[in-house]
Image (cartoon, rainbow, N blue to C red):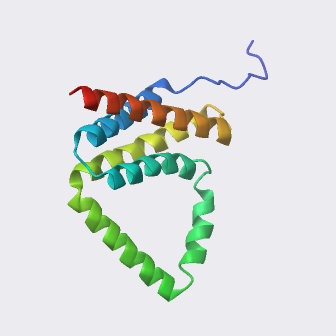
Amino acid sequence: MAPLFRPPSRQLPWLSLLLLFGNYAFMGRLLAHGGYSIEVKVFLMFGCFAIALIYLHPLADLSRFVRRWFSSDTLAFSTFVMIAATVSILLNWFQLFMPVVMILTTEGLARIDLQANEYDEWPTFFILVLVTGLGLLCGSLLGQMH
């Protein structure tokens, strides 16, 4: 007979965390070996940690933010201009754009897997930041060796 109450499974989603680590290692190697300016490197490194902050809260709060932001025509127009400028910059740096998209998707996958394994927000955040830091460090060390 199966028990009525089963304790939550707190296993780490190793596969999605390994994919996330690999993507951050690739990004770290790209930053170390690519010859980018220090401003680009700092911006991308802060962006990588900001992604973990963005994925801290579920995306349910996003709809409230979007409704409030697009309530004004001026703000909506300004937002579309900023998005178009960002996309043109990212397409100009296509070599950096694809790893960023891969990081966003794998970080989302890791966040969903951690949430499915019943991890709370802050442990999830710290796990994602740890994987981010280790991946960037490992990738930058590999990039400097080459």
Please give left or right for residue 124 compared with residue 82 in the image: right
Q: Residue furthest bottom?
A: 73
What residue is at 73 percent from the left and 15 percent from the top? 2
State the image coordinates of residue 91 (x, y, percent, origin top left). Answer: 24, 61
**Considering only vertical position in the picture, is 80 above or below 29?**
below
State the image coordinates of residue 96 (x, y, percent, origin top left). Answer: 27, 50
Please give left or right for residue 79 compared with residue 93 in the image: right
What residue is at 22 percent from the left and 45 percent from the top? 35
Give the position of the N terminus as an image quadrant: top right
**Considering only vertical position in the picture, is 78 above or below 38?**
below
Q: Residue furthest right?
A: 4
Residue sitting nearer the eye, 106 or 132? 132
Q: Note whether residue 113 is visible.
A: no
State the image coordinates of residue 41 (x, y, percent, origin top left). Answer: 35, 49
Q: Note whether residue 76 is visible.
A: yes
**Considering only vertical position in the picture, is 144 above or below 83?**
above
State the image coordinates of residue 88 (x, y, percent, origin top left). Answer: 26, 67
**Considering only vertical position in the picture, is 71 above or below 100?**
below
Locate residue 140: give its quadrant. top left
Q: How many marks?
A: 0
What residue is at 45 percent from the left and 30 percent from the top? 134
Q: Residue furthest front?
A: 38
What residue is at 46 percent from the left and 42 percent from the top? 107
Locate residue 126: give its quadrant. top right
Residue sitting nearer the eye, 65 or 39? 39
Give the position of the C terminus as an image quadrant: top left
